[in-house]
Image (cartoon, helix red, strand yellow):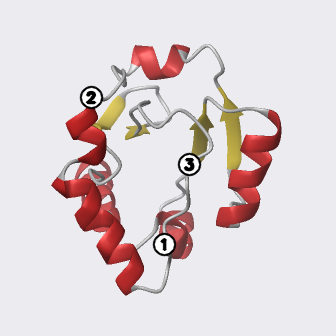
Amino acid sequence: MRLQQYETELERRDVKVVVVSFEAGFLARAYIEDTGLRWTVLVDIKRELYTAYDMLKAGFWDIWGPPTWWAYLKEIAHGRLPRKSRGDISQRGGDVLIDPEGIVRFHHVSKGPGDRPSVRSILAALDRETGL
C-alpha cells in the first residue's frame, strides 16, 4: 500500500509528511499531479539532503535487479502501470522519520526502486518510538 492510503493513521499520530525531490519545475509538478500528492514538497536541486542522509547514486543492478521487477509486477497486479521516469533514475530515495526535537527515529536508504519499507513497518517504528 502507498503512504497516501494511510493519511488518517498519520494524522492520528500527528505526523507531518514532507516529500523531498531533486527535480524542480515541470517534473516536480508532473509528479504531484500523477500521484495526487497533497503533502508539502521540498525541492533539493543540489541534493544536500540526499547527501546528508547517505542517499547516493544506485548502481545498475540496484536499479534493474529482481527487486525492481518484483515491485513493478506488484504494481501491475494492482492495476497501476509503471511510468517511464523522466528524471535521474540512479538517485536513491528513502524514508526518514524525524521527531519534533530533530532526532532521527527511522532511517532507510533504498537500494533501488523496489526497496522500500512497508508503510506498516514505518508506522510500527513510529509507534515504538512514541510509545503508542
- The residue positioned 36% from the left and 23% from the top of the image is 57
Q: Disc 3 versus disc 1: distance between alpha carbons?
A: 25 Å
Left or right: where 107 falls relative to 38: left
31 lies left or right of 64:
right
Q: Residue under circle 1?
A: 6
- Going from the N terminus, do you reach mark 2 or mark 1 first? 1
The residue that mark 3 highlights is: 85
Left/right placement of residue 100 relative to residue 128 reads right
Asked which secondary structure carries label 1, the reply is: helix
Are the residues tagged 2 and 1 within 8 Å (C-beta)?
no
In the image, which disc is placed on residue 59?
A: 2
Between 6 and 32, the one nearer to me in the picture: 32
The amino acid type found where label 3 is placed reads Ser
Q: Which of the two residues, 12 or 51, is positioned nearer the viewer here?
A: 51
Residue 75: percent from left, percent from top: 39, 74
Quarter-of-image position of residue 41: top right
Which residue appears at 46% of the width and 37% of the height?
89
Q: Specify whether 73 is left or right of 90.
A: left
Mark 2 is on which residue type? Gly
- Count neighbours of disc 2 (C-alpha within 10 A) and say few if under 14, some if 14 to 19, many if 20 or more: some
**Looking at the image, is mark 3 or mark 2 earlier in the sequence?**
2
Quarter of the rendering occupied by the N terminus: bottom left
Snapshot quadrant of residue 47:
top right
Amino acid type, residue under disc 1 in the picture = Tyr
Residue at figure coordinates x 55%, y 62% from the top left: 83
